[in-house]
Amino acid sequence: MPLLGAHESVAGGLHLAFDHIVSVGGEALQIFTRNQRQWQAPPLNADEISRFRARWAQAPEMPVAAHASYLINLGSGDKEQAAKSVQAFAAELQRCDLLGIPWVVIHPGSHGGDGVEAGLARVVANLDAVFAAAGKKSAVRVLLETTAGQGTGLGSRFAELAWIIDKSKFSGRLGVCLDTCHIFAAGYDIRTAAAYARAMVEFDRTVGLERLCFVHLNDCKKDLGSRVDRHEHIGQGRIGRDGFRLLLNDPRFARLPMTLETPKGVDLAEDRENLQVLRSLLAAS
C-alpha cells in the first residue's frame, strides 16, 4: 500500500508538523520549512534542527518532503526575479540538507509570455545554477511538480518535465511529484481504467516511472482540461473516487509517499476524513 499523509503546518516550530501528521493517522508528511510568502527566511538555528530531527527519530520510517516557496520562478525572463529565485531555492536545498529532508518539491515556473521553449530553457539554466550554489555536499533531490497549465505556467505536459530532466547537467538529482488535480486539469484523464492506463503509459514513456518519487492527492473542482488549479476533497470533485482507487491500488506505487493538499481547518478534521476515504478505496480493491 502507498504511504498516505498530508501537508501540515509548522506554525510554532518545524517539529510540530510531526504531531499534526500523527494526530490524523498519516504515514507521510510534506511541509514548508519557512514562510513561503516571503523571499527571505531567517537561518535555521541548532535548536530548530535538533528538535526536528529528534521528533522525526520517533517516527523514523515516515517519509518527509519539503515544498518550495511559490514565489520562486525559475522560468522567469526577469533577471532580478530569476536571480532571487535561484538564491532562494539554493537556500531551501541547504535548509533541507540541515534537516535531513531528502526531497524538495517545486513548480517548474512560468514563462511570462515568452513561450514554452524559452521558459523551459531558463528553468534548466536556473536549476543548474541552484545545484551549483547549493554545493557539492547537498544530497537533496528536486522533484518537479506536474502543473495544471494555468496562465503561462510550465510543466503541465509530461514531455516538458522530461525535457527539463534530460537537458539539466544535474539530471540525476531530479525527480517528479505528480499532483492528481493538476494532471487532470491539464487534460490527463484518470477516471477509468483505460484512461488511467493511457496517462501512466505516457508518463512512463516520457519521464519514466522510476522518476516518480512523491504524489499529491487532490481532487479537482474544475473540469478535465480546464487548466485551472483548484483542489477539492477526495471524491467530491471532478476526478471522483474511481480515479483515486486506480492510483492507490496500482502495485507499481506500493510504499510511494502520497500526501493530501486539500483545504482544512485548525482541528485537521478534513485530513482525517480524506485519509479515511482514501483507505476505504484501498480496502475495496
Image: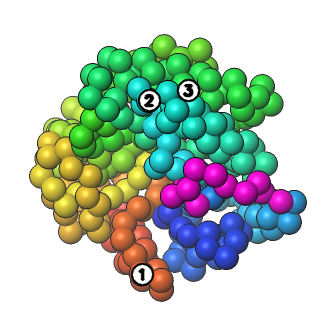
Eye-nearest disc, 2 or 1: 2
Label 3: state its secondary structure.
helix
Q: Is residue 157 magenta?
A: no
Please say if 123 is above or below 103. above
Q: CA distance from mark 3 to mark 1?
A: 35 Å
Camera-near label (3 vs 1) is: 3
Residue at the location (55% across, 37% down)? 85
- Toward the viewer: 126 or 202? 126
Residue at left 78%, top 57%?
44
How crowded pointer 3 is (Cα within 10 Å; few <14, some 14-19, many 20+) is rated as: many
Residue 87 relative to residue 124: left or right? right
Residue 161 shown left or right of residue 103 in the figure: left
Amino acid on which disc 2 is placed:
Asp
**Labelled pair 2, 3 in contact (Cβ < 8 Å):** no
The mark found on residue 70 in the picture is none
Q: Which residue is mark 3?
A: 127
Q: Which residue is mark 1?
A: 265
Residue 110, percent from left and from top: 36, 34
**Position of residue 161 in the picture relative to residue 115 (left or right):** right
Whole-angstrom CA distance, mark 2 to mark 1, is 37 Å
Range of magenta residues = 35-45
Secondary structure under badge 2?
A: loop
The reply to whether residue 247 is visible in this rendering is yes
Residue 40 among magenta residues: yes
Q: Which residue is mark 2?
A: 78
